[in-house]
């Protein structure tokens, strides 16, 4: 065998290949001069998932199971929080990474002031029956008293919805 080639050889050999970095499984190209705006990247990644559906309506299917695996769960579990976590992971963020909706709203990250709403923040829907947040999604944009969302496990798929702000229990900022 020949001796191991140096890093200089590999650097010169691959120098002409100008492949831009990709972010996780999303295939979104990164900005060569540094990371793109995280908030925009999160929305692009989430938007690319619109239309993903459960296979049988029982929290299953190949892509749904990828979201669940990202948070160390198998098929059959509610996956709204796993979806949000997966999207953030594809954007290069290590947190949040939790399949349980209430865990995505710790005091240090949560806010109630609708004036602070930003693209790519999370919103949480409260269940009076469960006495906790039971659904989470991403804010795509604010539209007056409404938010346009991207959310997983909504009608057994990833979809965009329009929600009035009075239906939102809490918001969370995992970027700033």
Image: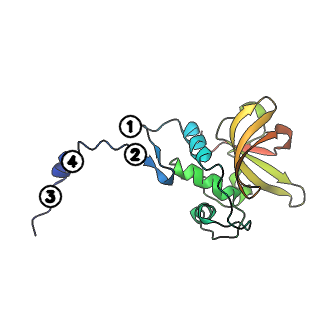
**Residue under pointer 3:** 5
**Snapshot quadrant of residue 103:** bottom right
Nearer the observer, 158 or 2: 158
Which is nearer the N-term, disc 4 or disc 1?
Answer: 4
Badge 2 crowding class, 10 Å Cα cut-off, few under 14, some 14 to 19, many 20 or more, is few
Image location of residue 19, percent across then percent down: 34, 44
Label 1, label 3: how far apart the Cα atoms are:
27 Å
Query: Quarter holding the N terminus?
Result: bottom left
Residue 65's x, y, as percent? Answer: 61, 65
* Distance (Cα) linking label 2 and label 4: 16 Å
Q: Residue at x 48, y 53 (%)?
A: 24
- Judged from the image, the secondary structure of the residue bearing numbered disc 2 is loop
Q: Is residue 26 above or below residue 68?
A: above
Measuring 72% from the left and 42% from the top, which residue is drawn there? 149
Which label sits on residue 11?
Answer: 4
> Which residue reaches farthest left?
2
Q: Are marks 1 and 2 in contact (CB under 8 Å)?
A: yes
| Displayed quadrant of residue 175 | top right
Which dot marks residue 21? 2
Q: Is residue 145 left or right of residue 94?
A: right
Residue 117 in view: no
Real-space CA distance between mark 4 and mark 1, rounded to the nearest whole angstrom: 17 Å
Which type of secondary structure does the marked residue at label 4 adopt? helix
At x 14%, y 62%, the residue is 4
Does label 1 or label 3 sit earlier along the sequence? Answer: 3
């Amino acid at each position: 065998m020949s001796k191991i080639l140096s890093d200089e050889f590999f650097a010169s050999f691959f120098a002409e290949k100008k492949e831009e970095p990709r972010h996780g499984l999303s295939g979104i190209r990164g900005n060569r001069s540094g990371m793109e705006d995280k908030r925009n990247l999160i929305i692009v990644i989430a938007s690319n998932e619109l239309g993903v559906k459960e296979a049988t309506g029982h929290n299953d299917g190949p892509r749904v199971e990828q979201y669940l695996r990202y948070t160390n769960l198998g098929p059959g579990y509610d996956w709204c929080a796993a979806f949000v976590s997966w999207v953030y992971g594809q954007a290069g963020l290590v947190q949040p990474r939790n399949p349980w909706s209430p865990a995505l709203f710790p005091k240090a990250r949560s806010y109630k002031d609708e004036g602070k709403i930003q693209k790519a923040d999370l919103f949480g829907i409260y269940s009076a029956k469960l006495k906790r947040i039971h659904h989470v999604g991403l804010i795509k944009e604010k539209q007056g008293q409404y938010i346009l969302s991207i959310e997983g496990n909504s009608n057994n798929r990833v979809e965009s919805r329009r929600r009035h702000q009075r239906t939102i229990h809490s918001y969370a900022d995992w970027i700033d």
